[in-house]
Amino acid sequence: MSQKFLPDGLSKVDQLDFLSGEERKFSRQIQGRTYANMFGFVERFIVAKILEITRGHWLGDQIALEALVRFCDEELKHQELFRRIEPMLAAGMPEGYRFSISLMRCSGCTAKMHLGRAGPDP
Ligand SMILES: [Fe+2]
């Protein structure tokens, strides 16, 4: 918990002159925790999308299918990484943090991704 969790170049917290040194560090930690949660969220969409792409290779190019399946296997490891990070950070930070995007609420995002767009329904 002595670390920033996010580099200054991404954080930009240093530009907030009204924060003390400890407040800046804590703000970077919140940003880093959110960054980790966002990436964990994105990793789930990557696997869903790649599995969708495999469909075109199920009975065709088995090398392409294997490559996509192995890619998913790596992405599943990333998901596990982010699942482990959140409770570790939660254990060291004050109560009250919430990352509120849910996959259920974003089920429309998958459909939009299929059309080449990402985001909530208009
Ligand atoms: Fe990944």
Image (tube, grey):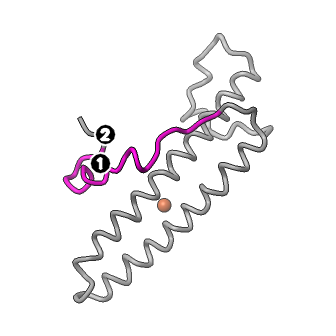
In the picture, the quarter occupied by the N terminus is: top right
Q: How many marks?
A: 2
Task: Determine the residue positioned at 34% across, 68% down.
Answer: 50
Q: Position of residue 16 (x, y in %)?
A: 60, 16
Q: Secondary structure at mark 1?
A: helix
Q: Residue furthest front?
A: 104
Q: Does residue 109 show up magenta in the picture?
A: yes
**Magenta region:** 97-118
The amino acid at mark 1 is Gly
* Spatial CA span between label 1 and label 2: 6 Å
Q: Position of residue 107 (x, y in %)?
A: 34, 50
Dividing the picture into quadrants, the one containing residue 26 is: top right
Residue on which the image places disc 2:
120
Residue on which the image places disc 1:
108
Q: Position of residue 65 (x, y in %)?
A: 33, 82
Q: Does residue 28 show up magenta in the picture?
A: no
Q: Position of residue 74 (x, y in %)?
A: 50, 71
Q: Is residue 51 positioned above or below 2 on the image?
A: below
The answer to whether the residues at label 1 and label 2 have Cβ atoms under 8 Å apart is yes
Task: Determine the residue positioned at 73% across, 16% down.
Answer: 20
8 left or right, relative to 118? right
In the picture, the quarter occupied by the C terminus is: top left
Q: Is residue 32 positioned above or below 13 on the image?
A: below
Residues 65 and 45: in front is 45
Q: Is residue 33 positioned above or below 11 on the image?
A: below
